[in-house]
Amino acid sequence: MDAIEILKSLKDKGIRFTPQRQAILEYLLSTDTHPTAEEIYKQVKQKFPGVSLGTIYNTLNMLKEHNYILELPCGDMSSRFDGNPVNHYHVMCTQCSKVVDFHNGLIDMDELAAEKTGFEIHTHSLIFYGVCPECQNIN
Ligand code: ZN
Ligand code: MN
């Protein structure tokens, strides 16, 4: 979904987005860096100097609750956010904290987990940790 479709679908649910909140959504959809809330704050602040970190968190939580975005729990480091909620995996560099998408169309993990456990699966989180090519070259 693009920002316009998401905003329309939120409006159908009775949720209206201010221009500040729209900017948060638009930034998240425009990047593949999986930014933290603080990184999103710094970006949006350039256009909306009055925006607060609280607004960033509220907006991200709301988008997450309605399954428009993903929150990636990154251990001790703060969460990262992904504007692409469709199933895919992530690799994270333990040295520079970069997070990169990893697509594997062969295995549907939700289906596999449902089959093996009898659970009705809603979502999953899978992050691989390692060292990225750039950090390998520095060492
Ligand atoms: Zn790295
Ligand atoms: Mn991703």
Image (tube, grey):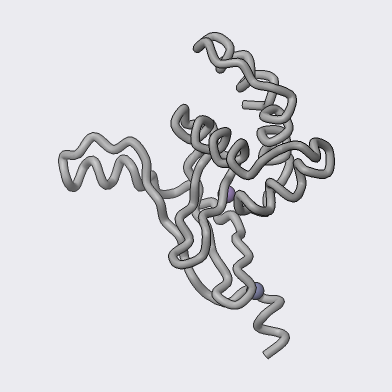
Image: 4 above or below 126 = above
Residue 66 placed where, x, y %?
47, 27
Q: Quick check: 124 left or right of 12?
A: left
Report whether 73 appears left or right of 49. Answer: left
| Quarter of the image where the C terminus is located | bottom right
Badge count:
0
Q: Position of residue 64 (x, y in %)?
A: 49, 35
Q: Is residue 136 above or below residue 79?
A: below
Quick one: which residue is furthest to the bottom in this view?
139
* Vertical comparison of 46 with 91: above or below: above
The furthest residue to the right: 47
Up the image or down, 19 lies above or below 70; here it is: above
Rendered residue at 67%/26% (across/down): 2
In the rendered image, residue 114, in percent from the top left (x then y), is placed at 24, 41
In the orientation shown, which residue stands out farthest toward the left? Answer: 118
Question: Of 18 and 116, which appears nearest the observer?
Answer: 18
At x 68%, y 26%, the residue is 3
Q: Is residue 114 left or right of residue 86?
A: left
- Ligand number 1: quarter of image: bottom right
Q: Residue 10 occupies which quadrant of the picture?
A: top right
Q: Residue at x 56, y 41 (%)?
A: 57
Task: Determine whether, in the image, residue 50 is placed left or right of residue 36.
Answer: right
Residue occupying image coordinates x 55% and y 16%: 15
Q: Check the picture and name the quadrant holding the N terminus.
A: top right
